[in-house]
Amino acid sequence: MRAHDDMVTGPTNSAATSATTPAGTAPLTAATLADDPCHHAAPYADALRSLAEQDWLRLHVPAHQGSREHAPGLANVVGEEALGIDFPMLFSGVDQENWRMIDHTRIRPIDRAQALAAEAWGASRTWFTTNGASGGNHIATTVVRGLGREFVCQRSVHSSVIDGITHADLRPHFLHPRVDAGLGSSHGVTPAQVEYALSEHPSSSAVYLVSPSYFGAVADIAAIAEVAHRHDVPLIVDEAWGSHLGLHPGLPVNAVRCGADLVISSTHKGAGSLTQSAMVQLGHGRLAERIEPLVDRVVRSYQSTSCSSLLLASLDEVRRHLVTHPEAIGEALSTAADVRARVRADARFRDATPDILAGRDAVDADPLKIVIDTRGAGITGSDAQYLLIRDHRIYCELATPSALLLLVGATSPVDVERFWSALQALPRSESEPERPIVLPGSCAKRMEIGQAFFAASEVVSAAEAVGQVSADALAAYPPGIPNVLPGEELSEEAVTFLRMTAEAPSGYVRGAQDSRMETFRVVADRSRQRPPHTA
């Protein structure tokens, strides 16, 4: 019997790969699992379908009780089959051999599904979650608080990490990533930066990084993990944009296989599960083992007691598809390479992959992220995105004034001819369009994040806000990286950038109390706006 058939003996899925992997070595790669019959099953999704085949009189939540007649509009939105498998968490875990809700002697389908996912991504343990990578970041920041208050953190983390820092009252020591002001992107940090930060702040309890970046820059996680472990602290990686990594020879290796101790995977983004579904993955080794009980407790404290069976099942199904159909990933990679090759050969647009790989922070680039430089093309990236949506019904992941960013799903090949024809049909201005500065510089810290967030606040005009301390985390979205943190002094540059973002056709500032950014929420008691104490 395979390890994942009998290794899980309770409500956990620890050590799902230990029986097939020598201690201290990297787990199996996903490519070696494609022919494993166990991975051709989706234990949790299959169990839901089996339940739905029964003729039930459903007298339980959810109130639609799986019936189109009870909720015709809802059935039209999600489909009748989806409605039928929307079982409550307890019932969807029912043992269909003896029909007991709880059977302590058997492994539940959800445990089998999580164990298979752990094996596929090379983790020692995986938790399915249903509040996206944002919820995963709230979990991870709470885990940090269980280790200590201070930690080293990449400044370009997602706004959900800043929310977690605020809730847990953490004290981050920020590392500033490489910034490409021309493309309007921020990337990663280097092992040397992490070494310096941990040496300067020896009380730090963890390192928290982002890889890959939103634009696809992959950091040297293996080297950074070595640095963190030398300082006896775990490495946490927000791998929201890399949930597909490590599942095909044509993709970069994923963070948990490179030595990260805790990884947040936004599975719906690149891997293709339903929106809002995600995974938390535990690494291997002494530090991962040390934090496992804490991670498990924190996951349970954040996870809903009414988890969506649809979201959980989608995680199970996407693992099955990714592992057993590597040719589908290969086809997506092939079409992405075709688009990139056409851009490289084009006289008007430019492939920005060399820019992404230009810094010492990037050791690889995600081939399923295509960054098209529009500088010199006679059209801004923002206008190109707008016209592609309006005239061609093509929606790109992101646009900056200088670039278009395409996200190719791991098993979703591109209609290359349709995209390329639309791109070539974009109008060209006779003069180069204006391209304003994309990213503002960092704002000066005046208060701790939690202190400013919970302080008395007031709303002032944009002009009045300059020079005052922000009470909110304000992030141009996507990608949702905060441009201003609570406790930071609002610079004129930051205020101007955020207002420009709000005015853009697809502009949105997460955290703003005014969507037009005509007003800002600032700390009211200005006597408290003193520089933080530094040791």
Image: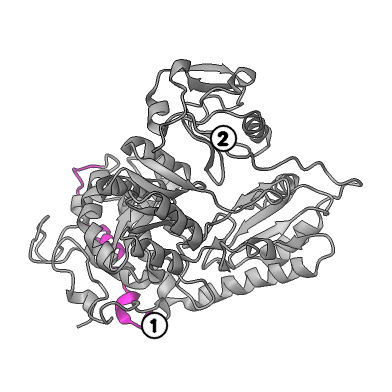
Secondary structure found at label 2 = loop
Secondary structure found at label 1 = helix
Percent of width and height locating residue 207: 39, 54
Identify the residue under disc 1: 32
Residue furthest to the front in view is: 535
The residue located at (19%, 62%) in the rendering is 12
Q: Is residue 136 above or below residue 511?
A: below
Pick whichever, 54 or 412, lies toward us: 412
Choose top left, top right, bottom left or bottom right for residue 418.
bottom right
Which segment did they paint magenta?
32-61
The residue located at (86%, 50%) in the rendering is 428
Identify the residue under disc 2: 443
Q: Amino acid at mark 1?
A: Thr
- Tell me the tag on residue 118: none
- Depth check, mark 1 against mark 2: the one in front is 2
Say whether disc 1 or disc 2 marks the residue closer to the N-terminus. 1
